[in-house]
Image (spheres, coloured by chain):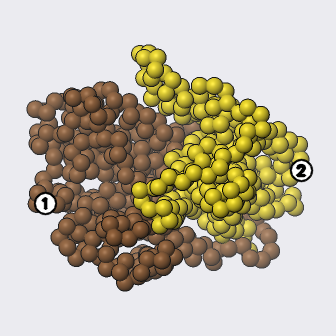
Chain colours: A brown, B yellow
Amino acid sequence: MRVHVRILASFALLIGALILTLLVFRVPIGEGLRLIGQGAIFTEAGWTRSAVRSTPLVFVGLGMAVAWRAGMYNIGGEGQYVLGGLAGAASVSALGTAATWSPAVPILAACAGGGLLAGLAGVLQVWRGIPVVISTILLNFMVLPLQEWLLQGPLQEAKGQIPQTDRLPDSAMLARFDPRFDLHAGVFIAVAAVLAMAVFLYRTPAGFRLRVVGLGPRAARAHGISGDRVRVWAMVLSGSLCGLAGGVDLTGLTGYLGTGFDQGWGFMGIPVALLGALDPVGVFLAAVYFGVLVAGCENLARFADVGSPIVYVVQAVAVLVAVGLQHWRFAPKGRAEVELG
Amino acid sequence: MNWADILTYAAPVGLAAQGETIVQRAGLINIGLEGTMLMAAYASMKLTAITGSPFAGMAAGLIVGVAVCLLSALFTVRLGADQVVVGTALNLGALGATSTMFQAEFGRSGQLLSVPALPDWLPGIDLGTSLLLLWPFVATWFLWRTGAGLVMRGSGEYPAAVEAAGASAIRSRIIAVSVGGALAGLAGAYLAVGIAGTFVENITAGRGFVAIAMVTFGRLKPWWVLAASLVVSVAEQAQFTMQGWGLGVSPQLFVALPYTVALLVLVFAGKGTRLPESLGRPFRRVT
């Protein structure tokens, strides 16, 4: 199948981009790869860390893929992730720790928070013609002050010293397997989300409609599919997944929400989705690759002068090469003729 | 909070937003503004440290800004690739590259590096702020009083018509991207050598995105974009001043205000006067 060829090509590209990046920044290749491997794969601390770092990337990557497949350029993953985390923390603080019998409560609240925010952007595009690219940037900047305000006001810890929430009660935390490592049950939610998304996109009428709207809006209209409705729901789904990432990080990893909650997963989800060819399995593989790379670079940073930022460079190089190759054959060459939109 | 501070802190966002205004008028959305500013800030800091002249640093910023944006134009205009994809990649690449170069050279602790600052010509007026105040004259004249400006706006509305009339929408878009890159480069350089006098990792801290938001807030009109940048600058500084006053209003409200108003302006704007028709759409000649 064509999509698998593209995923394989992406993978070769990613390895190439990593080696190129290490070369450019004069990291000895063998030593660099060894440190990355040690920090990410070959030790128990390593592979568990990789799994934990991959988890938000899977959710956000799937979220981006589903929105982009419908032709909606959601770049507000950051805001949706943070609002998801905030909604999760707020649900626990509003219901009281007694009513929070399961991590499902904050996690569902997180999905709802992210979904509402992205859904709003979707509605604004179909109703008022405001591109989601613009509105999601604006909404990101509205969420950040909201976070700051909530952490200094309504959601601040009972002690009232640091701008962060109280720790969630244990009943609201996802299961952990080994107290020495961060590995949590959210990893399974991520795998389930990949399977659910694959079934949704390729095996349900709604998923079919979503793909049609993205590929050929006019064909969709001709077949009586309401593009507007599909686009809004695609955004809601996309935002829910970004919110879910925030909710799972909150209940699985951090246990509280502070000013450093946002680790840039929202932005990294975009290259993950693109290099995964906007396909659920591809997104999963890309997310795991970058999760491994983030975990490995944390180890690399301990022994070398370079660290996690090289992950961004690898992403950028890979995306640009992929996009360049993809568009090369469409490049304008000869005489001018115009394409009517 | 005095007017000189407001101008100074408005300049990086304001200059970048003026560049993005030109770019968006030509029908492109340069999401890579943040990365462009970051690369320019790094280059300007390096060159200022080497030469000792902040003006050389500003020039380096300008050149790097144009170079980065021409690279993005290669993908978005020549190859017709998706602008959001390319811009996002540029942002990530710039953040990764500048952080890595900075760490490799100065260590992760970020030992403090100080470069000579831009001199004031008049109190509060230096190269950056004077450019901020003068640019809207140039942009307004160019966009609405010259043939090339008309072609540029046409490229944003309906590039096929521009091509049919014998002008090149592709060339016009590339010029727009270069101008946007020059201004974004100056904005990044001003941040490093005009304000901070140093470089830190991710020194732009989202200002490129703020600039994109301000273009929207100012409805792609140079004078209104300038006003929008000043509003953001006032709002950002008001939060620190207000903390001292101890009012009941939370200072974060002021920070969120410009973006909220920008969104509301778009929601309630008349249908005909919103954004260029072809904004964000790749234009390809069919061969």
Which residue is located at x 29 percent, y 34 percent?
A: A162
Q: Are marks 2 and 1 on the same chain?
A: no
Residue A187 vertical placement versus A8 (above, below): above
Q: In which quarter of the image is residue B57?
A: bottom right
Q: Can residue B92 be seen in this view?
A: no
Of residues B32 and A232, the one nearer the viewer is B32
Which residue is located at x 16 percent, y 46 percent?
A: A173
Measured Cα–Cα span from mark 2 to mark 1: 68 Å
Q: Which chain carries label 1?
A: A
Of residues A297 and A257, the one nearer the viewer is A297
Q: Mark 1 points at which residue?
A: A180
Residue B182 in the image: x percent, y percent?
72, 55
Please rate how many residues cluster around mark 2, counting C-alpha atoms within 10 Å: few if below 14, some from 14 to 19, many from 20: few
Kindly state the secondary structure of the residue where label 1 is placed: loop
Residue A228 in the image: x percent, y percent?
50, 46
Kind of residue at disc 1: Arg
Q: Which mark is residue B147?
A: 2
Residue A302 in the image: x percent, y percent?
32, 66
Residue A72 vertical placement versus A335 (above, below): above
Kind of residue at disc 2: Gly
Q: Mark 2 lies on which chain?
A: B
Which residue is located at x 19 percent, y 67 percent?
A: A45
Residue B86 in the image: x percent, y percent?
57, 62
In the rendered view, does B93 fall on the left or right side of A284? right
Q: Can residue A113 be seen in this view?
A: yes
Query: What is the quadrant of the C terminus of chain A in the image?
Result: bottom right
Kindly state the secondary structure of the residue where label 2 is placed: helix
Which residue is located at x 83 percent, y 49 percent?
A: B149
In the rendered view, does B252 fall on the left or right side of A111? right
Q: Nearer the viewer, mark 2 or mark 1?
A: 1
User: How many numbered circles are shown?
Assistant: 2
Residue B223 vertical placement versus A279 (above, below): above
